[in-house]
């Protein structure tokens, strides 16, 4: 991954970061919407600890959507680390 990222120009890396940010926002909305199908009163803060809510903890669709959100966040972290390494 690092080798691939190092070949991209800075503007492309910035565009990838912005795209990931939009994808994360969309995915987080999907996670919250799924959580609210199970428990309508939940807030965005509530779902930061889904294990506090057994109904969510055992919902495979919620877990799938949350896993996608986590993966996107990990990808964005990697892109941002690459951007930061180029500053030095």
Image (spheres, rainbow, N blue to C red):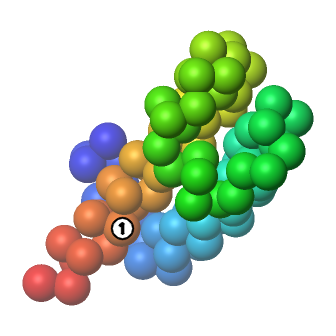
Residue in the foreground of this view, choosing between 66 and 4:
66
Residue most extreme to the left: 88
> Is residue 25 rendered to the left or right of residue 16?
right
Q: Quadrant of residue 23?
A: bottom right
Compared with 30, 67 (above or below) is: above
Which residue has dot 1 on it?
80
Residue at (81, 30) in percent of width and height:
38
Image location of residue 83, percent across then percent down? 32, 73
Identify the residue at horizontal 43%, vertical 72% (top origin): 9
List x then y, in percent, for residue 19. Answer: 65, 64
34 relative position to 12: left or right: right
Q: Is residue 34 left or right of residue 52?
A: right
Quadrant of res 56: top right
Residue 4 location, x and y as percent? 35, 47
Q: Residues within 10 Å of mark 1 (few under 14, many from 20)?
A: some
Quarter containing the C terminus: bottom left
Q: Please give the count of numbered marks on the rendered protein.
A: 1
Locate the N terminus and report the quarter of the image it occupies.
top left
Q: Secondary structure at mark 1?
A: helix
In percent of the image, x 60 and y 71: which residue is there?
18
- Which residue lies at the image location 19% right of the left edge and 72% below the top edge? 85
Residue 12 in sight in this render: no
Front in this rendered view, residue 72 or 16: 72
Q: Residue furthest bottom?
A: 87
Q: Position of residue 73 (x, y in %)?
A: 48, 51
In the image, taking residue 55 as reference, residue 29 lies left or right, namely: right
Q: Is residue 76 visible?
A: yes
């Amino acid at each position: 991954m690092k080798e691939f990222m190092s070949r991209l120009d800075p503007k492309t890396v910035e565009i990838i970061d912005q795209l990931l940010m939009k994808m994360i926002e969309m995915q987080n909305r999907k996670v919250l919407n799924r959580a609210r199908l199970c428990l309508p009163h939940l807030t965005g803060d509530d779902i930061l600890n889904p294990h506090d809510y057994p109904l969510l903890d055992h919902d495979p669709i919620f877990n799938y959507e949350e896993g996608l959100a986590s993966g996107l966040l990990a990808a964005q972290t990697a892109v941002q680390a690459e951007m930061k390494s180029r500053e030095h």
